[in-house]
Image (cartoon, rainbow, N blue to C red):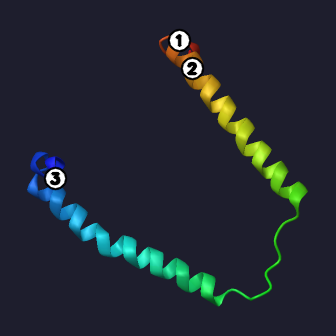
Amino acid sequence: MYIIGKLSPTEILKRIVSIPFIALAIVGTAYIFKLLPDQMRYPDLMWTLGAGLSILSFGAMAVGLGLLFTATGGLAAL
């Protein structure tokens, strides 16, 4: 309740207007999943592990680069 007092009227209006769009996106996603076939084929376990490891390694590299840039004050980008 305390956050509402800190927001401007235009920010409150933007948030109120965005709620139906979010609900529409949720309903649309549910409708898409309803139209999918009953016997969907899922990727095998090895593909899933490979995709997960690639995302994890990319995230680790992003964190490492962020720490490097933070530690050097942005000089590592030069």
Quarter location, residue 13? bottom left
Residue matched to label 2: 67
Q: Is residue 11 visible?
A: yes
Q: Residue at x 59, y 83 (%)?
A: 32
Residue matched to label 3: 1
Which of pointers 2 and 3 lies earlier in the amino acid sequence? 3
User: Crowdedness of circle 1 by 10 Å Cα count: few (<14), some, many (20+)?
Assistant: few
| Residue 4, horizontal then vertical, whole percent | 14, 52
In 3D space, how far apart are the residues under numbered discs 2 and 1 (Cα atoms)?
Answer: 6 Å
Of circles 3 and 1, which is in front?
3
| Residue 59, horizontal then vertical, whole percent | 66, 37
Quarter location, residue 10? bottom left
- In this view, the residue in front, 36 or 66, is 36
Q: Residue at x 53, y 10 (%)?
A: 72
Badge 3 amino acid: Met
Quarter location, residue 31? bottom right
Q: Determine which of the numbered discs, if any, sits on residue 71 in the image.
A: 1
The answer to whether marks 2 and 3 mark residues whose Cβ atoms lie closer than 8 Å is no
Q: Determine the secondary structure under disc 1.
A: helix
In 3D space, how far apart are the residues under numbered discs 3 and 1 (Cα atoms)?
Answer: 38 Å
Badge 1 amino acid: Ala
